[in-house]
Amino acid sequence: MAESGWADALYDLLRANGVTQFGYVPDAGHRVLIDRSLADPDAHSIPLTTEEEGVALAAGADLGGQKAVLLMQSSGVGNCINMLSLTAGCRFPFLTIVSMRGDFGEGNAWQFPMGQAVEPVLKAMGVVVLRCDGPQDVIPTATAALTMAFQSGQSVAILLGQRLLGAKKF
């Protein structure tokens, strides 16, 4: 799959599985997903002021019979900790796709603390964590995550590692 081909295939998979709401805080790692959702007349692309709003968006989507995904960078996970308690207490499906920082090849020291805490924090909040480090991982992992979230009612995070996304240059 071409370097950006996995992102287009991921968007197509999300839409084919009924995801119509895309909550996001702008992030280069999610550029293709955000741009495609903005251009898609059958999708609702919702810019958020903070990532925790995306948890509430997912709850509202589920109550309205729709499916949502929260697109965020790893630093945004820290903003969601308290809101993630709602996914267990209210028992609604939750899917987030997290573009990682503080990971393989990171050159910005400020990204390491939260980047390294993402997986243990999500697991502590009862979120199933699945990781993609290469283009070949994206579609099988996203397919599993969609099933786990929307058929089993679980909270699931897909981590897009820096081996997949590339490390930003500083």
Image (tube, helix red, strand yellow):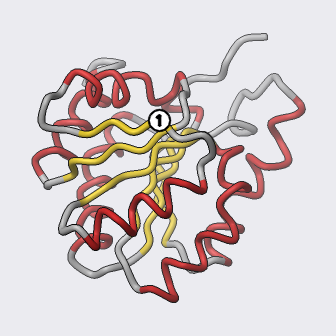
Is 164 drawn above or below residue 51 in the view shown? above
Please indicate whether residue 118 sits to the left or right of residue 113 in the image: left
Quadrant containing the N terminus in the rendered view = top left
Tag 1's secondary structure?
strand
- Residue at coordinates 36% horizontally, 52% vertically from top-left? 69
- Number of numbered discs overlaid on the protein picture: 1
Q: Looking at this rendering, what residue extends furthest in the bottom direction?
A: 89
Quadrant containing the C terminus in the rendered view = top right
Is 158 drawn above or below residue 50 in the view shown? below
Which quadrant holds residue 45?
top left
The one nearer the camera, 59 or 73, is: 59
Q: Position of residue 162 (x, y in %)?
A: 59, 33
Give the residue pinned by disc 1.
47
Q: Position of residue 15 (x, y in %)?
A: 16, 44
Is 138 drawn above or below residue 130 in the view shown? above
Q: Looking at this rendering, what residue extends furthest in the right direction?
A: 109
Which quadrant holds residue 66?
bottom left
The one nearer the camera, 119 or 36, is: 36
Q: Position of residue 107 (x, y in %)?
A: 81, 22
Q: Looking at this rendering, what residue extends furthest in the top direction?
A: 170
Please indicate whether residue 83 sits to the left or right of residue 114 in the image: left
Three-letter amino acid code at the position of disc 1: Pro
Please indicate whether residue 165 sits to the left or right of residue 1 in the image: right
Is 109 drawn above or below residue 98 in the view shown? above
Please indicate whether residue 83 sits to the left or right of residue 42 in the image: right
- Residue at coordinates 28% horizontally, 73% vertically from top-left? 63
Q: Residues within 10 Å of mark 1 (few under 14, many from 20)?
A: some
Q: Position of residue 83 (x, y in %)?
A: 61, 69
